[in-house]
Image: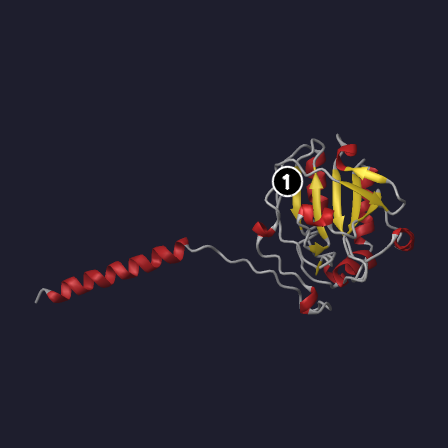
Amino acid sequence: MIKFPVRNHLVGLAIAATLVATACAPKVTETTASPEATASPAQTVAATDASATKADVSVGKPAPNFTAVDSNGKSHQLSDFKGKVVVLEWTNHECPFVRKHYESENMQKIQKQATEKGVVWLSVVSSAPGNQGYVDGAKANSLTKERNASPTAVLLDPDGKLGRLYGARTTPHMFVIAADGTLAYMGAIDSIASSNKADVAKAENYVTKAIEQVLKGEPVTNAVTQPYGCSVKYAS
């Protein structure tokens, strides 16, 4: 006669444990390209794990200093720009996700708006020789002119040292560094992970927002987002 109350009690405990486990389970965020995306799945990096970025590249911490040569043969160090906001843009002109932002003139617009406010904009090419997106200085300058782009400089990183230092995984992959040298933003250029130019106008532009907030001395609302695009074509 007493077996039923005990069994009911055990069943109740099991149900309660299940509810608690469900409530505490971590939420899984997925990055998906829109149906209109034209890039092949193999070109898309589903950057779902922020821990894949180098541990010493974190928002709120000093951005790693670097030395790199630009498309005109001039050497730059990040420390040269102390006191200025700096944007790092990883790029590959053959990547459909990059083309989306240049062919829509979205990237040029952001570059122009930023540099007119005194921001230093450094486009970085980490494609290795023989890989998609690799350019020499002449080609980089030609692309800048053809696309009416407005970077402060195009840094050539064929050995991938700068890209790997920052853990750059996609093109585009964006970083905003505050005037005091701390990293203020890292991640996607905007909120819609597709290669469809029509999505540009509908997306929230994280980089524009981050630059505005950093220039005002405000904390960045979405300081870390998931980058999307083509994988950076590092040397193997």
Query: Which quadrant is the N terminus positioned in?
Result: bottom left
Please tell me which residue is depicted at 73% across the width and 69% down the height of the picture.
Answer: 38
**Image quadrant assignment for residue 82:** top right
Measuring from the top left, give residue 229's x and y in whole percent: 70, 59
Q: Is residue 132 above or below residue 67?
A: below
Secondary structure beneath dot 1 equals loop
Residue drawn where x is 78% and y is 60% of the image: 100
Percent of width and height locating residue 153: 84, 44
Is residue 206 visible to the viewer in this orientation of the structure?
no
Which of 41 and 133 lies nearest the eye of the viewer? Answer: 133
Q: Give the residue at mark 1.
A: 220
From the viewer's perspective, is residue 139 above or below residue 78? Answer: below
How far across and down, in percent of the image, does residue 2 sit? 9, 64
Q: Nearer the viewer, residue 138 or 213?
A: 138
Q: Residue at x 70, y 56 (%)?
A: 170
Amino acid on which disc 1 is placed: Val
Q: Sort mark 1 into few (<14), some (14-19) or many (20+) by Cα contacts within 10 Å.
A: some
- Whether residue 115 sits left or right of residue 222 in the image: it is right
User: Does residue 22 appear left or right of residue 41 in this picture?
Assistant: left
Q: How many marks?
A: 1
Q: Residue furthest left?
A: 1
Residue 69 horizontal/vertical position (percent): 83, 43
Choose between 170 and 205: the one closer to the eye. Answer: 170
